[in-house]
Image (tube, rainbow, N blue to C red):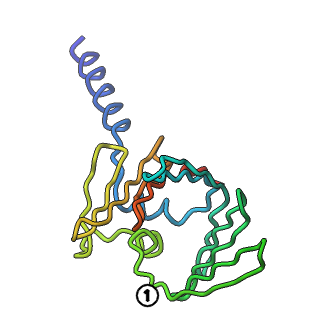
């Protein structure tokens, strides 16, 4: 009887430990390098207008390609410190030095999360959300997980537009 009691307690404790998986920066960094389809929604505070776009994020050995498929076809390629923007409809290309762009969100995506960084702090909101806040508190990016998979990225850009990017693994 006592052995059965201890076995039940052990099984219960083991199932609680297994089910209480806490997201770590290692898990986040791993998830940030996967290929996804996405739906991005932007909320413009000035006119309370929500815009939606969708596409794919594809990583390879040398960089990342973001193909926006709707509402307008655009391709972004980040490689070797440069961001190439290609407006497919107008057939126009532009290249920007990523360091000059100084974009907190892009820097996190490309470089991953470093727990020792002096540029930002890491807050664990709960077992499924990690928040990264720049040292000067002007930038915040929130990464949310569902079933231990990166599911949603939320951030506000430099002009105050709120973005929510829903991800689906490819």
> Which quarter of the figure has residue 88?
bottom right
- Asked whether, in this view, residue 130 is left or right of residue 136, the answer is right
Q: Nearer the viewer, residue 24 or 95?
A: 95
**Image point 69% across, 84% down: which residue?**
93
Disc 1 is placed on an element classified as: helix
**Image point 60% across, 50% down: which residue?**
168
Q: Nearer the viewer, residue 2 or 20?
A: 20
Q: How many residues crowd around disc 1 within 10 Å: few (fewer than 14), some, or many (20 or more)? A: few
Q: Position of residue 30 (x, y in %)?
A: 47, 63
Quadrant the C terminus occupies: bottom right
**Image point 46% across, 72% down: which residue?**
106
Q: Nearer the viewer, residue 14 or 147?
A: 147
Q: Which residue is mark 1?
A: 100
- Asked whether, in this view, residue 54 is left or right of residue 126, the answer is right
> Which quarter of the figure has residue 19?
top left
- Asked whether, in this view, residue 131 is left or right of residue 99, the answer is left
């Amino acid at each position: 009887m006592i052995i059965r009691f201890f076995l039940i307690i052990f099984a219960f404790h083991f199932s609680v430990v297994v089910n209480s998986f806490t997201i770590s920066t290692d898990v986040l960094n791993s998830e940030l390098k996967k290929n996804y389809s996405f739906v991005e929604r932007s909320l413009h505070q000035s006119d309370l207008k929500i815009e939606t776009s969708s596409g794919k994020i594809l990583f390879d050995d040398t960089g990342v390609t973001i193909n926006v498929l709707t509402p307008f076809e655009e391709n972004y390629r980040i490689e070797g410190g440069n961001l190439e923007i290609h407006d497919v409809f107008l057939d126009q290309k532009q290249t920007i030095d990523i360091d000059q762009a100084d974009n907190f969100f892009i820097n996190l995506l490309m470089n991953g999360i470093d727990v020792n960084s002096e540029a930002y702090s890491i807050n664990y909101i709960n077992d499924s959300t990690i928040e990264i806040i720049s040292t000067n508190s002007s930038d915040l990016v929130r990464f949310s997980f569902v079933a231990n998979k990166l599911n949603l990225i939320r951030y506000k850009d430099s002009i105050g537009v709120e973005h929510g990017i829903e991800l689906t693994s490819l």
